[in-house]
Amino acid sequence: MKIKKLLLAALARLRCTYTRRREANCFLLNFGSSSSSCCCCCSSSNASNSGSSSSSKQQQTRNQQLLQQQQQHQKQRQLQRQQQQQQLQQQLQQQQQLQQQQQQQQQQRKHPQAPRKMRLLTHNLLMCNRRQCSGGYPLKIKLAEDAAAAAAAVKEETQLQRQLLLSLLQKLDWGALRQTAAELGIDLPPTVSESDKNDDNFLRAFQSAVLDLDIMEGTLVCPCCQREYPVSKGIPNMLLQDDEQQRQPQQLLLQLQQRFLQQQQQQPQQLLLHQQRQQPLLLQQQSQLQQQQQSQQLLAAAAAPAAASCCSGSNPSSFLLQQQQ
């Protein structure tokens, strides 16, 4: 019996040691599996982290590209809007200019203004205004020398205005006009005859000198005192300075009258010829009037006795015979 108890105790001890060893092995196995699983998890987490970082970088680049595209689109839209605004402003300016031109044309039609151009017609009436100057007529024309005023004397061809030219011939100083026209390269005859007034070539040359030639830039120089009067944009400035004394208007009128009388005295032959040509016409008209009056008197004298004879009952044929005798 003792031997059995001893054997059973030894077996129990063996069982305990076996079970303990088995539990230790299981623990080791469990620990190894857990560590391997942890390593796998770590590797998988690292891989996922690397993939997420690369994807985030791609998204950032895409976002940046989208932002750049949006900015470019916005810039293009802004440029288009600016261009549209500029076009609208240009259209508005053009419309305003057209409206202003139309208004100016309407005003000019209602209230026409004379063109601001100095012509030889006005130059023929200008003289030096200084009181110290004894003569001062006609003023010499000195054109501008710079390149901008190369077309200072502009010629404009217009239709022939016969009646206006014939009326101007009687009012202008022909000698002064011929002198200034020669300075500008226009040849005019020394005198004007009756045949010249009917000549289209002469009238055309006269019109080109008086009306078609515009002095835009230059100076007018007095031949006596060398006083200069500037001409700017076709307007002569005849004003004097404060230290210069101006002539009185009465003196200017007297001088103009004297010039006109001198011009008439220089052409006495033309006046005489004109009067001589008019005298035969007047004589013819007077003779025609006298003949008409005589015929009317004869008819009245013949009608009175005829009426008396008719009333008395006499024969009209005998009355006619008496009239013939």
Image (cartoon, rainbow, N blue to C red):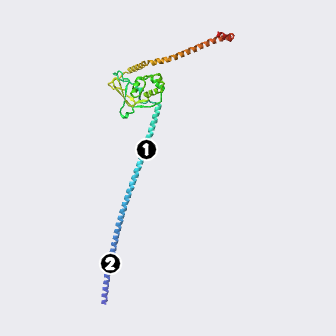
Q: Residue at x 68, y 12 (%)?
A: 317
Viewer-side residue, 146 vs 184: 184
Q: Is residue 315 left or right of residue 6?
A: right
Helix or strand or loop: what does disc 2 sit on?
helix
Where residue 207 appears, as percent x and y from the top left, is 45, 27
Residue position for label 1: 87
Which image quadrant: the C terminus?
Answer: top right
Residue at 54% in and 16% down: 284
Across and down, in percent, residue 163 comes to: 48, 25
Viewer-proximal residue, 259 or 44?
259
Crowding around mark 1 (Cα neighbors within 10 Å: few <14, some 14 to 19, many 20+) is few
Q: Residue 96: horizontal and vertical position, in percent?
A: 44, 39
Mark nearer the viewer, 2 or 1: 1
Where disc 1 sits, the SS reads helix
Residue 305 or residue 323, whichever sits in front: 323
In this orientation, does residue 124 appear? no
Residue identified by numbered label 2: 25
Visible residue check, residue 43: yes
CA gap between label 2 and label 1 equals: 92 Å
Q: Quadrant of residue 22?
A: bottom left
